[in-house]
Amino acid sequence: MGEEVARLVEGMSVNGAVRFDGSAFVDCFIQGKVVCDGELVIGENAIIEGDIECRSIVVYGTVEGDVVVSEVAKLLEGQVLGDLKTARVSLKGGFKMCGKLNVAGDTSGVLFHSSVV
């Protein structure tokens, strides 16, 4: 059986810090720090106003805060308005970022897809 994924869906709103012990899918508004021990998927309707710490992240929505990722950040669409620190990153066209990108280690962890200009 696969890992259960916590879900905060469109229409919900959270004011305060949120912690997920495993993986999570967020597609709502959160104002506060988010900590996730597993993979955190930020849905296209999500707006996160706060810092994020997680093992891995997939971004389709909006993050307004600094992001620290211990493994891999997949930046597919949406935007991060803040600094991003990660071990590996995958960027795809349509994604926007305003802040510093810090990829720990060597640059082999940076993956640029052909659609990125």
Image (cartoon, helix red, strand yellow):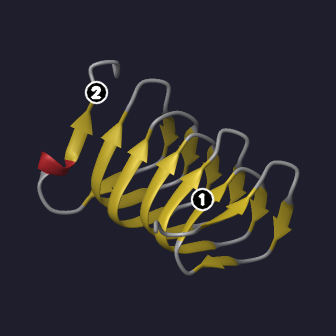
Residue annotated with mark 1: 65
Q: For label 1, count other residues whose C-alpha is less than 10 Å away and answer few (under 14), some (14-19) or many (20+).
A: some
Q: Nearer the viewer, mark 1 or mark 2?
A: 2
Q: For label 2, count other residues whose C-alpha is less than 10 Å away and answer few (under 14), some (14-19) or many (20+).
A: few
**Spot occupied by residue 71 in the image (x, y as percentages of width and height):** 31, 64
Front residue of 12 and 109:
12
At a point 57% along the width and 47% down the height, the residue shown is 81
Q: Earlier in the sequence, mark 1 or mark 2?
A: 1
**Spot occupied by residue 107 in the image (x, y as percentages of width and height):** 14, 48
**Where residue 113 is drawn, which disc sits there?**
2
Residue 97 is left or right of residue 11, and the answer is left
Kind of residue at badge 2:
His
**Spot occupied by residue 83 in the image (x, y as percentages of width and height):** 46, 56
| Mark 1 touches mark 2? (CB < 8 Å) | no
Front residue of 22 and 17:
22
**Where residue 37 is drawn, which disc sits there?**
none
At a point 62% along the width and 51% down the height, the residue shown is 63
Residue at the extreme front of the image, as rendered: 1
Front residue of 24 and 84:
24
- In this picture, is 42 found above or below 113? below
Kind of residue at badge 1:
Gly
Residue 80 is left or right of residue 50, and the answer is left
Residue 8 is left or right of residue 90, and the answer is right
